[in-house]
Amino acid sequence: MKTFIKYPLLVLVLFMFDQVTKYFLQAKEIFLFPFVSFTYAENTGAAFSLFQNQNFALILISFVALIFILYYFKEYPLALSFILAGLLGNLADRLLFGFVRDFISIGTFPIFNIADSCNTIGIVLLLYAFWKEEKVNKARSLEKV
């Protein structure tokens, strides 16, 4: 599949998965395992409920982040596809509802959603890409010596 189709399609699929799961698990509590459940929560803040009731600022930060993601997208398409999907999923919630719909509860960890998971996966992939680049650059500089 062509690159210019593959990554935007990944963003769309992840975004839709986030939105569909939020819709179907809205206002429900489903226990899956002893410490894992789907527990609906409305988060007016960011990760770990930071910046509560700062919706306008969080929307503004999201748009600034969107500009950076689009600018660097060609350099790190896989990692930034996950981050973009996560950003769009939570941004859509903020714009439509004024809060982010969270529902995945694992033990005492703060409740989160698919978009948050996409952000985490994207950041891990981005850190791996940076580490790999640094390793290649060090090898090249040693070859020159």
Image (tube, helix red, strand yellow):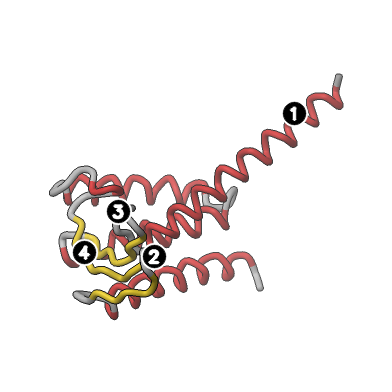
Determine the CA span between mark 1 and mark 2: 36 Å
Q: Quadrant of residue 35?
A: bottom left
* Mark nearer the viewer, 3 or 1: 3
Mark positioned earlier in the residue sequence (3 or 1): 3
Residue of label 4:
41
What residue is pinned by disc 2? 114
**In the foreground, 81 or 32:** 32
Q: Which residue is labeled 1 in the image?
A: 138
Q: Are marks 4 and 1 in contact (CB under 8 Å)?
A: no
Q: Closer to the N terminus: mark 4 or mark 3?
A: 4
The tag earlier along the polypeptide, 1 or 2, is: 2
- Within 10 Å of disc 2 (Cα), the crowding (few <14, some 14-19, many 20+) is many
Mark pair 3, 1: CA separation = 39 Å
Kindly identify which residue carries mark 3: 110
Q: Residues within 10 Å of mark 3 (few under 14, many from 20)?
A: few
Position of residue 55 measured from the top left corner of the image (x, y, whole percent): 17, 51
Q: Amino acid at mark 4?
A: Ala
